[in-house]
Amino acid sequence: MIPHVKLFIPGPVEVSPETLQAYAAPMIGHRSKSFQELYADLQPKLQALFYTKRPVYFSTSSAWGIMEGAIRNLVNKKVLCCANGAFSDKWYDVALRSGKAAELLAFPWGTPVDPEAVRRKLATGDFDALTLIHNETSTGLMNPLWEIAEVMRDFPGVSFIVDTVSSFSVLKIPFDELGIDVMLAGTQKALALPPGAALFSVSERALAKAATVPGRGYYFDFIEFQKNHEKNMTPSTPSIGHFYALRQKLAEISAEGIEARYARHRENAQIVRSWIKDRGFGLFPKEGFASLSLTCASNTRKVDVAKWIQSLRSRFQCVIDGGYGKLKGETFRISHMGDETPQTVRQLLGWLDECLADLS
């Protein structure tokens, strides 16, 4: 058996024993009445979390499958990819690899997407889709989704595709109210489920547009998802375990209360931010745009982050992240989403203090 090391990384996050037990429930046929009943039972609960009257689809893939699928389903002319971190940069690359015309609207890492820059680009009339990562996990930055949504209202012909992979269920993101066309989330972030599945919703206008776009493929064809949804099924064999785990998690969210869940994530974030500043580190993202899901800290003290993390792992059997991509060592990231509480976060920070003292 591999020793259990508790994860405070940005994903996968820690999965509770209760969720793992649900995940391990006996299999059922994915074309059976039992599965249809399970699928139907989850729908209203997922719609409540998405704040939508639209269907919520389930994909047995990482969120990247739906990110690529959204490009294949909704880009006829050209897609504008808003980028200010590793994952938003990659979405542009995915668009090009999908054979689509694409343009990068790039901002420095740690700097939010500027809504007025979006407006200027869309005003050219060159684009029929836009991609945005709400919470850029690589930099711990939360983009101004509401302000960008206001800009998008002036361009109804441009499909608004939003990745909420690491912000979904951390704060209210009202799909219908914001006028989003595709909103997607992964299971391994704030939902605190095992990785390997994604949830997404598609607006009525986007579904109608997808029907006119050639070359959608099959596995991520939105039309196939809708056809199967009408029968309480998925287009292809799903991960049954994820459905059971999701049912367990949705019950936990209901018991906690969604507003209490949002408040817990806000408190977790504030605790970590205060600790970062008190210890003489800096916040990497621009002030006012720090994530509620994780904190990305600038290593202003020039600590040996790798040694710090190794000490944490060996002494306390848990781990944080040492910075992503080109920020490795220059930053470190602490996840405080999912099932984490102010108590578990404070415990982690105490352990980090002890290990930091060892480096002095």
Image: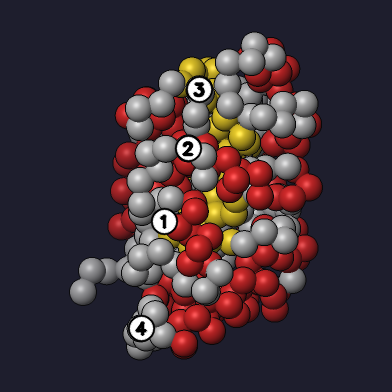
Dot placed on the residue nearer the N-terminal end, 4 or 1: 1
Dot placed on the residue nearer the N-terminal end, 3 or 4: 4
Quarter of the image for residue 82 reads top right
Q: Amino acid at mark 2?
A: Val
| Residue in the image at 58% along x and 26% along y | 128
Q: CA distance from mark 4 to mark 1?
A: 27 Å
Q: Where does the N terminus fall, quadrant-wise? A: bottom left
Determine which of the numbered discs, if any, sits on residue 128 in the image: none
Question: Which secondary structure, mark 4?
Answer: loop
Q: Is residue 195 above or below residue 180?
A: below
Say which residue label 3 marks: 78
Question: Which secondary structure, mark 1?
Answer: loop
Q: Nearer the viewer, mark 2 or mark 4?
A: 2
Q: Amino acid at mark 1?
A: Pro
**Rendering coords of residue 332 (x, y %):** 45, 37
Determine if residue 86 is in view. Answer: no
Determine which of the numbered discs, if any, sits on residue 29 in the image: 4
Image side of residue 82 versus residue 65, left or right: right
Say which residue label 2 marks: 213
| Residue in the image at 70% along x and 50% along y | 175
In the image, 157 versus 16, the foreground residue is 157
Dot placed on the residue nearer the N-terminal end, 2 or 4: 4
Dot placed on the residue nearer the N-terminal end, 3 or 2: 3
**Rendering coords of residue 241 (x, y %):** 39, 76
Say which residue label 1 marks: 12
Q: Where does the C terminus fall, quadrant-wise? A: top left
Q: Nearer the viewer, mark 4 or mark 1?
A: 4
**Rendering coords of residue 226 (x, y %):** 53, 60
Q: CA distance from mark 3 to mark 2?
A: 13 Å
Q: Are marks 4 and 1 in contact (CB under 8 Å)?
A: no
In the image, 342 versus 220, the foreground residue is 220
Q: Nearer the viewer, mark 3 or mark 2?
A: 2
